Image: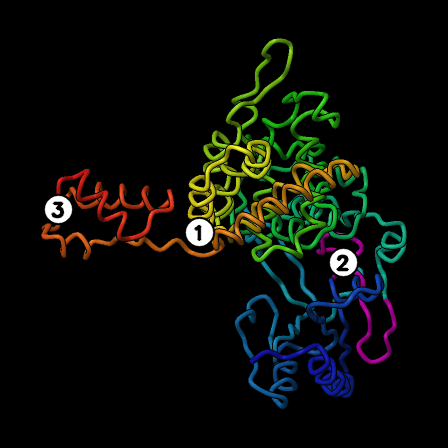
């Protein structure tokens, strides 16, 4: 069952009074308080209860429904999607973000308990009943100054995931990371982090930020690109100054990411689309060369699939997402190329493109990515030029009824009806039938051509 925020808050009001009567005190903590101070709509509720034992807390919560004890060993109980935690101390015992020994202590001071948290802005407590703010580490001032600052150097470095949290918070909130925190992050070894945790932080800055480029800039500054050679290769990869006055491919990617973020509401699959924006020029480092005094990168779109196919699996094992992103990368130059050749481009080329792109959301996703790539500097002439490309493509797609799944007109049963027995030759004949279909021939015409060509 899904509980909305209003239901959770009403539940907490009743529970908090019971806790108070038992000699305890309950606080909102973490992101809820941070978002409250920033006047943002909180997404989740996390609480911390002081002054009573875990057993007493369990007894109180049990009056209001079934209590999950999944996190009991960490001093956390869950009731109706709300976390109820006791203050705790954490001791690093092994590598990785999970290598901690947890000691719960409901009588810790607010300062001691909040010291284990990552950033000052996430270490503020707010009394559930009175809304009193307790701010042991000056978090409110840092929120006002738009600064992300670690709390304790010795505890911060124990969890390498915090480096990724820093960069995604910087993008989402348009905050600056404090110089001391940057220096600390530079020293941390991130190699032990599981890919799924890194992927979650990537998704946050790609999907929930208006300026995801901020995260990439900090990744460069904090030497994080060494873990992502495909991104690092973009740095100092030159581009033609006439078409790319912004500089190297890395700077271009930053611009495209932010432009893509401004357009992502038009996407039916924002994650795939934003990953496509991140990876779209991965092919340039291997294809860039100087020819007749000009910097060119022929076939960088197709060649970009190779590094993307090594980069993406290190983030996720979701094969469908990887496939869709690679299709967008491979074809991201097609809208501009087709428009340039609009007087000679064949209908077959459009049919082939539509067939290939259907798994990635169709032509719309490609046009969005191409628009971000082409207009990332947002000059009026670029926007105007691309509007013509959009009109040209949409007219073609609508007139040819192509924005749908490709369904072969000729199938194996049709060949059997012609008297053939299933064999290895079937795939060759069906592939040829598909080629005829892409040229625009009807089923009757295709079968006639197959009979002639294969002497059926």
For the C terminus, which image quadrant?
A: top left
- 2 vs 3, front mark: 3
Q: Quadrant of residue 102?
A: bottom right
* Location of residue 17 with respect to 202 vertically, above or below: below
Tag of residue 214: none
Residue at the extreme bottom of the image, as rendered? 63
SS for callout 2: helix
Q: Is the C-beta separation of discs 1 and 2 under 8 Å?
A: no
* Location of residue 78 with respect to 234 vertically, above or below: below
Task: Identify which residue is drawn at 18% across, 46% down.
Answer: 426
Q: What x and y, as percent, mark residue 378? A: 77, 39
Task: Identify which residue is drawn at 46% across, 47% down.
Answer: 354
- The answer for how far apart the CA atoms under marks 1 and 3 are is 30 Å
Q: What x and y, as percent, mark residue 419? A: 9, 52
SS for callout 3: loop
Dot 2 corresponds to which residue? Answer: 122
Q: What x and y, as percent, mark residue 273? A: 58, 48
For the N terminus, which image quadrant?
A: bottom right
Boundaries of the magenta span: 113-133
SS for callout 1: helix
Indicate left or right for 433 with 356 as reference: left
Q: Residues within 10 Å of mark 1 (few under 14, many from 20)?
A: few
* Location of residue 435 with respect to 269 vertically, above or below: above
Tag of residue 320: 1
């Amino acid at each position: 069952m899904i509980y909305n925020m209003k239901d959770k808050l009403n539940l907490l009001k009743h529970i908090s009074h019971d806790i108070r009567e038992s000699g305890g005190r309950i606080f909102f903590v973490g992101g809820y308080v941070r978002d409250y101070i920033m006047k943002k709509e909180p997404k989740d509720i996390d609480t911390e209860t002081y002054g009573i034992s875990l057993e007493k807390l369990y007894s109180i919560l049990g009056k209001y429904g079934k209590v999950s004890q999944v996190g009991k060993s960490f001093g956390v109980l869950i009731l109706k999607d709300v976390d109820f935690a006791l203050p705790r101390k954490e001791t690093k015992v092994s590598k990785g973000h999970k290598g901690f020994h947890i000691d719960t202590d409901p009588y810790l001071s607010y300062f001691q308990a909040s010291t284990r948290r990552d950033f000052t802005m996430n270490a503020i407590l707010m009394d559930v009943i009175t809304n009193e703010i307790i701010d042991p580490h000056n978090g409110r001032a840092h929120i006002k100054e738009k600064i992300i600052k670690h709390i304790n150097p010795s505890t911060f470095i124990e969890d390498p995931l915090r480096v990724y949290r820093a960069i995604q918070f910087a993008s989402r909130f348009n905050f600056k990371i404090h110089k001391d925190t940057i220096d600390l992050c530079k020293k941390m070894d991130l190699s032990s982090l599981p890919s799924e945790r890194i992927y979650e932080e990537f998704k946050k800055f790609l999907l929930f930020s208006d300026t995801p480029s901020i995260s990439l800039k900090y990744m460069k500054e904090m030497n994080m690109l060494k873990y992502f050679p495909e991104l690092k290769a973009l740095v100092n990869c030159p581009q033609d100054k006439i078409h790319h006055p912004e500089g190297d491919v890395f700077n271009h990617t930053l611009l495209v990411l932010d432009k893509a973020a401004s357009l992502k509401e038009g996407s039916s699959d924002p994650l795939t689309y934003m990953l496509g924006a991140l990876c779209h020029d991965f092919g340039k480092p291997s294809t860039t060369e100087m020819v007749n005094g000009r910097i060119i990168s022929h076939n960088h779109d197709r060649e970009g699939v190779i590094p993307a196919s090594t980069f993406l699996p290190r983030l996720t094992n979701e094969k469908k997402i990887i496939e869709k992103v690679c299709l967008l990368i491979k074809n991201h130059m097609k809208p501009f190329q087709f428009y340039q050749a609009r007087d000679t481009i064949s209908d077959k080329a459009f049919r082939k493109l539509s067939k290939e792109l259907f798994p990635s959301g169709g032509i719309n996703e490609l046009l969005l990515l191409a628009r971000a790539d082409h207009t990332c500097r947002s000059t009026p002439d670029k926007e105007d030029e691309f509007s013509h490309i959009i009109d040209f493509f949409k007219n073609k797609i609508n007139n040819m009824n192509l924005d749908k799944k490709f369904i072969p007109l000729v199938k194996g049963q049709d060949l059997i009806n012609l008297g053939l027995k299933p064999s290895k030759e079937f795939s060759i004949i069906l592939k040829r039938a598909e080629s005829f279909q892409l040229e625009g021939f009807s089923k009757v015409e295709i079968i006639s051509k197959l009979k002639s060509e294969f002497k059926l």
